[in-house]
Amino acid sequence: MSIKDCINRAVAAGEMDKDRAERILREYDGVFEEMRQNMGHTQAEVAAARRVVEDARNAAFEKRRITQLQAAASTRLAQRLDAYKDVKGNPNPHGFLKDIIEARRGAGGETLAGKYESINGEYRGRLLEAVKLFRTLPGGFRRNKGALDDVGRATYGEKTETDVAKRIAKAWSDVAEELRTRRNAAGGNTAKRGDWNLPQDHDALTARKAGYERWREAILFREDGKTLALDLDKMGEQFNDGIPFTEGSLEVFLRDAYEAISTDGYSRRNPSGQHGSSLRNRRTDHRFFVFKSFDDWKRYNDTFGSGQDVFNVMLNHIDRMSMEISMMEVLGPNPHASYALLKDQAMSLAQLKGDVKAPERVRKAQLMGQEMFDHFQGKTSIPVSKGLALFGSAVRNYASSALLGRAVISSITDANIMRDTSAMAGLGHTAPTKMMGRIYRSKKLRDELATAGLLFKNGVEVGNAVARFELEDMKFKSAAGLADFVIRSTGLGHLSEMRKQASGGAFMHTAAVDWVGRKFDELPTDVQRWLDNYGLSRDTWDLISKAEVYETPDGLKLLRPQEIKAVAGQRIADLYLEVVQNFQELSVPSTNIRGQVISKFGTKPGTIWGEANRFGMQFKGFSVTFLLDHVANVVDEGLAGRPMNALKFGASLVIGNTLLGGVAMQLKALMIGQDPRDMTTAKFWGAAFMQGGGLGIFGDFLFSDYNRFGGGLAGTIAGPGIGLISDTAKLTLGNIADGGKDAGKDLVGWLRRWTPGGSLWYSSLIYQREILDQIQQAVDPKAARAFRRKMRAAEEIDTKYFYPPGSSVIFGGGNVRAPNLGNAVGE
């Protein structure tokens, strides 16, 4: 009896539903036609039937597994939602909708963003040798770029002359396989392939423009158009029951793959289904094609793939897998359905509560939470107009390259924030500072901390150094590289990186020497409260406390997630690392998901309103983060019934940041050739208070009509990027319109404000006085008047120039003198 007869009888007997029977028969017909090309009719019938039956069994088993995983996740999330409380101890289901995405100050358990960072940190840390070898130099230039192809060939098992390439290839293979198995355990469905070397990305737009025939030739053949680039034997072993593919039998797969690639996956989506509802099968197609050699892979990657180098391909794969794993481990195999259910459950609880305002709070939280969820997945970064988005990003990055040369001075307030955060977590005030000293003395310690999951990122990703100042969704490569070059040239990228590692290292060290071996109730009260905020409560901590303490070669003791995993499992190890990484981010503030969503007001990149918003919020994102993470923390202490804590931490934050803000202002004054400002006046401390809270640019307007960049209040609200566009238009179109009578003056003014690196703290004063001022005097008859106006503006803020505008040490002229430090105390 044929398989068709069996299925028809099962339908007639009511043992199988008609739709399922039709799906199986369609699959059978397709497999039979494929196999008949390589074997006889009867053999093809038997082989096709065997495969369809086996597939049906596997599908049924997999369906039960996924259902169980999803049910377990739904139950776990419902319990967390129902038990979630605000700082006052009141039920807070609407808060959970946001905090499950990201909560720097804790959500009583794992979050999507925290889980992602912990997974990402763990597996990137396993590629530490590659990270160190291929770190980017300032501006985005790759170190040891010539060795990248050697690593790529090593991943394909090809001959290579260097042992380091072989070690990196082995580490990559182990990481990729662990990510695959972990994703499958969470609900994924990607088969093991022993000959899988590097991920194969595909560029949908390039493939669509080229058309099927050109794409087919590029992926199937080498440059001669005759020699196969794909290994049809190996592809057959994995995807064709061990039967090698031929060009003919592969054709149907190629056409299906091209449709999926060129439509960005829409050709395989059920129009009635939810977009992106399940992640479980997403990684299957990326493993279908098997290239014969690394050169074959690279040629396709450069033409129809991502075009990125081998190192970035590896990191991007870790990033994507980390995101998908985090979503499935936190929300289940169908994370979108889980989050939709959470929103419904929160509204149901609100409706039953009897509080007329509760449903409205939930509705707002649903919108905010969904925005955060979309942002986490990168959906909000997809531009409506790619050209407009890239233009806006390029302008803003260029403005950053010109204006952030002294940002490292403003970051002096990080020292107080580190101190305050450390005290709040129960580590004491000085733990991060002491750890920073150890890190500076030992590069090996930095490697140890990176292996523990505290990986440095500034040297890996272009633009990461400037990320704390920007809200960019996408980057124009050359402009982003320029901004990256300037920020890292100031030392800020390195300093921020060291501060974060020091904070995380201090947490792991304190946990190892002061907390391990003690019951939860025996820990200091501040430590208990900090750990409990993240879900590391009594039972969980007692498991963690049994972990072996790791000791580095130079004798530093650390409580690492690796040792916690051995005694408490992966989930608790991830949660511990999430706590440490959140402590890092709180200690050295940078933009986060919640702050970015609030700052963007729901606007999309590549739209007029979206780009206008991003221009206006440039350099203001840090202030939003500071309010959300630190000012709100002080408020929460008060609301939680701990007014003395709120007073203590609030006073420390305000006083410390104001004092350091004042120091930053005085250093900046010296760097632009002015005496220190008079600190005996209220206007100074008002500006210092604003500087300490990341609002120094607005502090300039307390007692002046212009900010430090030379723009008015309206221009500051619009953003520096708009000023760059306006000044460029004035320099070009404006001078064309008026015959160029002020062209020289306008050019000097443009260079003074918009030269990349022109504001570097160690060279800007020389650039201004010895080059631009001298040019201005030569081309602008009114230069002297402009210089006097600057000197009067300095007097309005109680200071004078010791290196006055227009003066020169090299060429002579002007009253150059030593700075009058006594002016700081009113002399």
Image (tube, grey):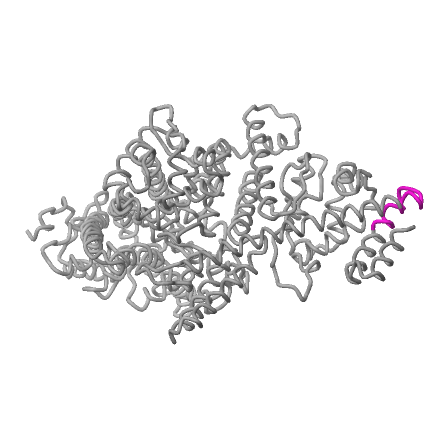
Q: Is residue 120 on the magenta stretch? A: no
The residue furthest left is: 827
Image location of residue 25, percent across then percent down: 83, 56
The residue furthest bottom is: 356
Image location of residue 287, percent across then percent down: 68, 43
Residue 693 visible in the picture: yes
Is 375 in front, or is 688? 375
User: Eyeballing the image, is 374 above or below 664?
Assistant: below
399 sits to left or right of 674: right
**Residue 508 falls in image quadrant:** top left
Is 712 in front, or is 588? 588
User: Eyeballing the image, is 479 above or below 505?
Assistant: below
User: Eyeballing the image, is 233 above or below 741?
Assistant: above
Image location of residue 239, percent across then percent down: 76, 43
Is 220 in front, or is 415? 415
511 sits to left or right of 280: left
Q: Who's the residue at 11% across and 47% down the image?
A: 820
Which residues are the magenta region? 31-45
**Residue 89 falls in image quadrant:** bottom left
Q: Who's the residue at 39% across and 65% down the image?
A: 726
Dominant secondary structure of the magenta stretch?
A: helix
Is 594 in front, or is 28? 28
User: Eyeballing the image, is 515 above or below 354?
Assistant: above
Q: Is residue 32 on the magenta stretch? A: yes
325 sits to left or right of 535: right
Q: How many marks?
A: 0
Residue 770 visible in the picture: no
Image location of residue 804, percent across then percent down: 19, 52
